[in-house]
Image (cartoon, grey):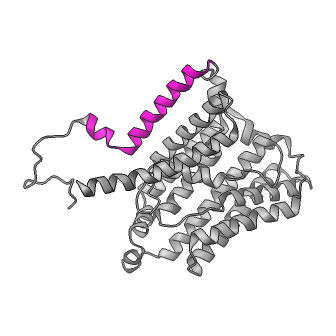
Amino acid sequence: MSDTTLSPRSIPDRLESPLASALKSWEMLLALVAVAIFIFNSLATPYFLNPWSLSDATFNFTERGIIALAMAMVIISGEIDLSVAGILALASTAMGAAAQFGVDVPVLIAIGLAVGVLCGAFNGLLVSGLGLPSIVVTIGTMSLFRGISYIVLGDQAYRGYPSGFSFFGQGYVYWVISFEIVLFLVMAAIFYVLLHRTSFGRSVFAIGNNAMAAQFSGIRVRRVKFVLFCLTGLMAGLAAILLTSRLGSTRPSIAFAWELEVVTIVVLGGVSILGGAGSILGVVIAGFVMGLVTFGLGLLNVPGIVMSIFVGLMLITVIAIPIVARRIKSRR
């Protein structure tokens, strides 16, 4: 029985107020931060509250957020995948090469998803099959996948995608509601159910807390990790479809350094970098926070390098907060 479980023999002296209980939730704190950023942006620039501007703000995080949903499960399991941006670049390159031969939109989508799954399966085989450290493997494959894109394209770019292909990254479902944000929310619901409402999700948490104990309890740890890397590759392939459609072209530098931003969204969402804890809801809210921050800075004409510095500082801060909090609590 956990410390927070009430029983007839352990009744607290005073009941905690609902507000105090809510504020202890990381997701609630993130939501309050999102509201504060929204208010600040609306006061800082008059263009922020324009409906089309708010719609454009969603493009700042939806593609990264889709990858972050799968990355969250990988990190909860105690692993990490730093090759997601390289997978995206390779999938986009494969779609661009196919588009030069005039293939239809459904085939392009199939190619993007297939390349993503194959790259994820390659990572999964190296990590779960050979037992190699995921951080080392995915740093290597990050360079491998993007390097292939540079070999194929050099300093050139693929263009000439079919006209219907542009809908996935530029289309709107209704008024200012883009197809990307709808797809992101649908994928978030799917991953929420997968992680929090299925035995597979419980296995992911068990592996992240203690892989050896999970193995002895009958969980097929290697198979679960392999599936997780395949899922991450699949989501990177899906993000490649959206980003390539939105840009209308493919360059080998596409989505450069996105792995840092994806990991930042995941950790900001409350997922423990050490594994074993986290929620999809937190990742979704963190995606909105990142989108509001970067879009607001963009409206204020803040240079991109300053945004990168801000993202890096945010990542360090979010990782440090739980560690510092635990040390303060242990000293008390």
Say above or below: 151 vs 165: below
Q: Position of residue 264 (x, y in %)?
A: 55, 50
Does residue 143 sit above or below 50 in this rendering? below
Residue 11, how many percent across, how many down?
A: 10, 49
In the rendered image, residue 257, in percent from the top left (x then y), is placed at: 68, 53
Residue under the point 61% across and 53% down: 260
Quarter occupied by the N terminus: bottom left
Task: Please report the residue visible at 58 percent of the width from the left and 75 percent of the height from the top.
Answer: 127
Q: Which residue is painted at 51% across and 51% down in the image?
A: 316
| Residue 59 percent across, percent down from the top left | 66, 38
**Quarter-wise, where is residue 98 in the image?**
bottom right
The magenta stretch is: 19-46
Q: Nearer the viewer, residue 266 or 69?
A: 266
The quadrant holding residue 2 is: bottom left
Q: Main secondary structure of the magenta part?
A: helix
Q: Residue at x 49, y 41 (%)?
A: 285
- Among all residues in the image, which is located at the extreme left? 9
Q: Is residue 231 visible?
A: yes
Looking at the image, is 213 positioned above or below residue 263? Answer: below
Residue 150 sits inside the magenta stretch: no
Question: Which of the pair 155/65 is nearer the observer?
Answer: 155
Viewer can see residue 265: no
Identify whether 24 is placed above or below 326. Answer: above
Q: Is residue 76 left or right of residue 4?
A: right
Report how many numbered discs are placed on residues in the image: 0
